[in-house]
Amino acid sequence: DSDLSMRTLSTPSPALICPQNSHTFQNGRGSSTSSSSITGETVAMVHSPPPTCLTHPLIRLASKLQKEQANIDRLPDHSMVQVFSFLPTNQLCRCARVCRRWYNLAWDPRLWRTIRLTGETINVDRALRVLTRRLCQDTPNVCLMLETVIVSGCRRLTDRGLYTIAQCCPELRQLEVSGCNISNEAVFDVVSLCPNLEHLDVSGCSKVTCISLTREASIKLSPLHGKQISIRYLDMTDCFVLEDEGLHTIAAHCTQLTHLYLRRCIRITDEGLRYLMIYCTSIKELSVSDCRFVSDFGLREIAKLESRLRYLSIAHCGRITDVGIRYIAKYCSKLRYLNARGCEGITDHGVEYLAKNCTKLKSLDIGKCPLVSDAGLEFLALNCFNLKRLSLKSCESITGQGLQIVAANCFDLQMLNVQDCEVSVNALRFVKRHCKRCIIEHTNPAFF
């Protein structure tokens, strides 16, 4: 028993993510040990590798018969690894408990480029600690193969778990911790110790107000290197306490940003967007939906991105009018996607500017814009022939005539939303005839 205990500590087996009340097979040589005693929670468990043989003759015979009947064991190793590659982290750990062969295959380095944990009951801090310890066996204290960690929705993740990742995973490239209970300090540790991090999702993390390097990391950097972070994709949706000052710091440190999502960051104003455009000149996709303080002046700043901007969401920004749309239309000629739903200040004139200048537009949402009428749709139809998705939900001034003009010119239309619009059945049938691949979302019970 003592020899087995020593072997288990020196060669830890998979960090199994499984319920505490699950029973593990025990034999005469030893048993599995749990890392937590909290009833009903999901925890990380450390087990010794499956035994090579079973001692009891009857058990050995049953195992032999079962093995002969298992067709999956006839697959070669490379096929088994391919099958395992589709499993989430917790299931992969369970497979490692089946037999010696599966144990060895389950820890193939190719399967551990990504750790994906989900569920509110998982003890994520402990799971990450045990998993990284196991993955660091060949390279002590450093896990070189791990590139992606996704623990979105795991409420029990704390700064301690994130610090474990920062310390052990210098090659980390993608981190998703949306909806987790983490703070600025933990995020600073990750971006400071993981220099290759490019994709960061902290959406719904209400304590996160900024993205920056730690003070120690900033001091170590030479003046030639600067104080920049390599993040290109940043999602801070629902980070309600993010303010202009924090956005200024983010922009100054994350100058390589190409994708930035600030949905429902309700404290952001035009001044914050001005800071953003000073430093982050490579942004391709930007969302400021539901940022109620963003106005036409903010769109004037965003327009400085010019032809680099391909995706823009300004939904429910009530202070935006045709003036702001005109800035975007004039300078961002390669815009492909625009979501302006709920911007009630937009009229047919704004749609005209957009249609005549952004002719490569593929997706447009102008739902709940009561001042947009059939005249605006006519400009779209005569200029934006590549339009594939169009949402006109709750546009009170839209009629069937405008839809027919769109259908007659935009043959590639694939999605049309006319819910809560006064559109006749004949108009909907006309759209269906001319745009055969178009899915129509409507509220007319007579059309099917």
Image: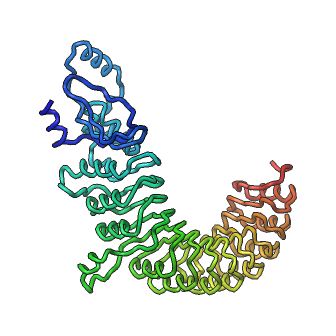
Q: Where is residue 143 in the image (x, y as percent from the top left)?
A: 25, 56
Q: In percent of the image, x 55 and y 74: which residue is there? A: 310
Locate residue 83: give its quadrant: top left
* Residue at x 56% of width, y 78% of height: 268
Q: Where is residue 446 in the image (x, y as percent from the top left)?
A: 86, 49
Q: In this view, does 368 lie above or below 252?
A: above
Residue 186, quarter of the rendered image: bottom left
Please give the count of numbered marks on the rendered protein: 0
Residue extending farthest to the top is 58
| Towards the viewer: 329 or 8 | 8
Q: Which of 193 and 418 is in front in this view?
A: 193
Image location (x, y in percent) of residue 179: 49, 58
Position of 359 compared to 241: left or right? right
Q: Quadrant of residue 148?
A: bottom left
Q: How is the image coloured?
A: rainbow
Q: Position of residue 89 (x, y in %)?
A: 37, 45
Question: As rendered, which of 339 and 59 lies closer to the eye?
Answer: 59
Seen at 82% across and 55% down, the residue is: 429
**Relative side of 295 to 72, left or right:** right
Name the residue at the front extreme: 38
| Residue in view at x 37 percent, y 56 percent | 149
